[in-house]
Amino acid sequence: MKPKQFIPLIACVLAGVLWIFIGQNFVLQNVLGGLIAGGGMDLSLFLASASSPSFQALWFTSAAVTLIWLLTTTKKSPLNSAEVREMQPTWWICTTVLVLLGWFYQLFFTVLIWQISGVAPVEGINTNYFQVPPGGWITLLVVVIFDVGLLFWLPTMFASPKSYRLVVPGAMKFLGGR
């Protein structure tokens, strides 16, 4: 990785940290809260007990996968474009797995963790899960896709070494050729 790639990588990491740990809760609370909150659901409690932990787990997973991608591509020395293109399915698999894990984290922290413990997340309600309406689930799943873009696609586009940055979709358009 070239030294000039460190600045965009650090900027991406900082943007991801600020978004996941600060900005996203603000947006979910104040902009998308009406879509997420079910009938009588305490949105603040949901964000603190389910949504935030799931998105933070996605952040840590994305950081690990991004680091593995960067270390793997840094160690390789492609001899031709065919060797570079061989990494494209790997990048797409990483992206798909991150999205699926993000969706699983939402399901786990919103429903499964409460089902396993047998405890209701809200005192006085007979259900032992957060009652997120279908529109809220769709909203959360779309936010996961956005987060994977911010946490994996953007850093790999800016910081992938050598010709491997051309594997990342959109890199040619945003960064140009070699």
Image (cartoon, rainbow, N blue to C red):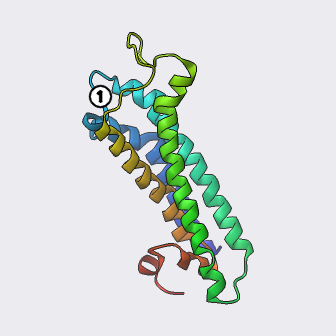
Q: Quadrant of the C terminus?
A: bottom right
Give the image location of residue 41, x and y in percent: 32, 23
Q: Percent position (x, y) of residue 36? A: 31, 35
The image shows residue 49, relative to residue 171, as above or below, that is above
Q: Secondary structure at mark 1?
A: loop
Rendered location of residue 93, percent (x, y): 57, 63
The answer to which quarter of the image holds residue 78 is bottom right
Q: Quadrant of the N terminus?
A: bottom right
Q: Is residue 33 above or below residue 92?
A: above
Image quarter for residue 71?
bottom right
Q: Who's the residue at 47% across and 30% down the image? A: 111
- Check disc 1: other Cα within 10 Å, few if <14, some if 14-19, many if 20+: some
- Mark 1 — residue? 38
Report the number of discs.
1
In the rendered structure, the answer to whether residue 68 lies left or right of residue 137 reads: right
Q: Nearer the viewer, residue 131 or 178?
A: 131
Rendering coords of residue 40 (x, y %): 28, 21
Q: Residue at x 46, y 83 (%)?
A: 176
Residue found farthest to the top: 124
The amino acid type found where label 1 is placed reads Gly
Please tell me which residue is depicted at 61% across the width and 68% down the height of the picture: 90
Up the image or down, 3 lies above or below 62; here it is: below
